[in-house]
Image (spheres, rainbow, N blue to C red):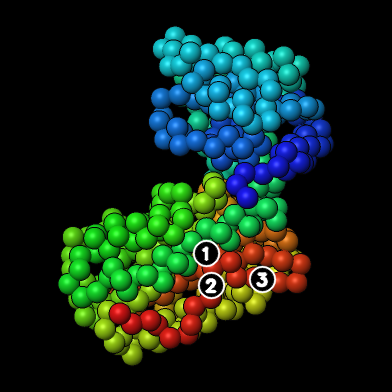
């Protein structure tokens, strides 16, 4: 089912309001696409335009209040939000800040107004407007209320992430149709996005990867205009979206028979992923999963300096927590994570990624677990 029923949004809002009361916040101010959508269901690609700001207020009680450009009123009115305050945007003199200030002071009654402020957050307000707003209302951090709510996915959210994973599975299964010796890598990237759309993706906002002998230089560069050649290792890493939720996992293929070094490194990656999977259960910490993978990856003085070996997945391609040594976030039932070990092979790297759900009894694969043998094209 696309979207969520009303109870989902009511529950999220009530949980936020309970936490707001504990921290004596008069309101929450949300300015980013995922946070606005989390509490309302307001799904649109119009956020791609940086011209207009969008604001959502969570009061201490009752439904959210939208303070948005008038162009969005019709769509917002289809959500459960009833109090929608608009202005004609863009307005070079006052692009909604006075309306937002008035609404916040009305709702918060001079109490502190929480705004997400920690790692992996940003404030989507022009700097000058943020300064003006800060002079008119009592802004505070949100005590990680929104972060902690979004880390724990509902069953309905997990269904959407798993659906995205299954769409990617179908596209990955057809890669031998579009990739072979002498086909250019950039053409493979374009064709793979078509496969994702044909399989049912709403859009493919993220596609990374690489191909070269014995691995790839990096995993974030645009695809090169270079033909695949025998001995290359091809990797595609997709973040496709279904109904507003991402999957984020990759797959590797050898163009022709792989070398013994590549086969050994690939096997080591899968062992690292398996080690984290076995530990991934409620009560473990994000750092535990990092150390489990890193122990396997550094057996032969290999490993990567990518900074982390996985992360949360959901409405954003990457979410909290991060699988790093210093993230001691305790895993809970309902979290969705990527396991993303990487290994160095000479001057190249090889990366493998899976998506998992944390259940009451342990981890469950949302992406289909790969076979131990590296597939050959």
Residue under the point 59% across and 42% down: 118
Can see residue 305?
no
Residue 56, disc: none
Between the residue at mark 2 and the residue at mark 1, the CA separation in whole angstroms equals 8 Å
Residue under the point 72% across and 60% down: 332
Residue 255 horizontal side relative to residue 197, left or right:
left
Position in image of residue 328 (x %, y %): 66, 60
Q: Please tell me which residue lies in front, 333 or 27.
A: 333
Position in image of residue 236 (x %, y %): 37, 65
Residue 363, disc: 3
Q: Secondary structure at mark 3?
A: strand
Picture layout, residue 116 above or below residue 339? above
User: Do tag 2 and tag 1 residues touch (Cβ < 8 Å)?
Assistant: yes
Q: Residues within 10 Å of mark 2 (few under 14, many from 20)?
A: some
Residue under the point 34% across and 61% down: 192
Pointer 2 residue = 368
Observer-side mark, 2 or 1, equals 1
């Amino acid at each position: 089912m696309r979207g969520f029923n009303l109870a989902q949004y009511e529950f999220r809002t009530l949980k936020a309001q309970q936490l707001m009361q504990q921290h004596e916040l008069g309101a929450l101010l949300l300015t980013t696409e995922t946070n606005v959508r989390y509490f309302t269901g307001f799904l649109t690609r119009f956020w791609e335009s940086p011209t207009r700001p969008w604001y959502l207020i969570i009061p201490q009680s009752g439904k959210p209040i939208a303070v948005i450009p008038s162009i969005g009123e019709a769509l917002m009115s289809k959500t459960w939000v009833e109090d929608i305050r608009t202005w004609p945007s863009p307005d070079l003199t006052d692009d909604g800040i006075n309306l937002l200030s008035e609404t916040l002071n009305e709702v918060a009654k001079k109490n502190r107004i929480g705004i997400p402020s920690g790692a992996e957050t940003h404030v989507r307000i022009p700097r000058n407007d943020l300064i003006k707003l800060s002079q008119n209302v009592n802004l505070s951090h949100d005590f990680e209320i929104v972060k902690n709510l979004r880390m724990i996915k509902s069953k309905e959210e997990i269904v959407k992430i798993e659906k995205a994973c299954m769409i990617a599975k179908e596209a990955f299964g057809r890669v031998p149709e579009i990739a072979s010796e002498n086909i250019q890598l950039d053409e493979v990237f374009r064709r793979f996005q078509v496969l994702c759309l044909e399989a049912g993706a709403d859009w493919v906002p993220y596609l990374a990867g690489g191909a070269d002998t014995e691995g790839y230089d990096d995993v974030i560069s645009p695809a090169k205009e270079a033909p695949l050649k025998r001995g290359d290792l091809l990797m595609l890493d997709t973040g496709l979206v279904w109904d507003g939720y991402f999957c984020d996992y990759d797959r590797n293929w050898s163009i022709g028979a792989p070398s013994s070094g590549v086969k050994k490194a690939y096997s080591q990656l899968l062992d690292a992923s398996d080690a984290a999977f076995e530990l991934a259960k409620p009560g473990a910490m994000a750092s535990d999963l990092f150390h489990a993978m890193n122990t396997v990856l550094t057996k032969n003085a290999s490993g990567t300096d990518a900074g982390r070996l996985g992360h949360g997945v959901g409405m954003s391609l990457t979410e909290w927590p991060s699988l790093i040594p210093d993230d001691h976030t305790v895993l809970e039932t309902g979290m969705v994570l990527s396991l993303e070990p990487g290994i160095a092979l000479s001057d190249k790297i090889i990366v493998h990624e899976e998506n998992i759900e944390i259940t009451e009894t342990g981890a469950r694969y949302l992406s289909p677990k790969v076979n131990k043998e590296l597939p050959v094209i």
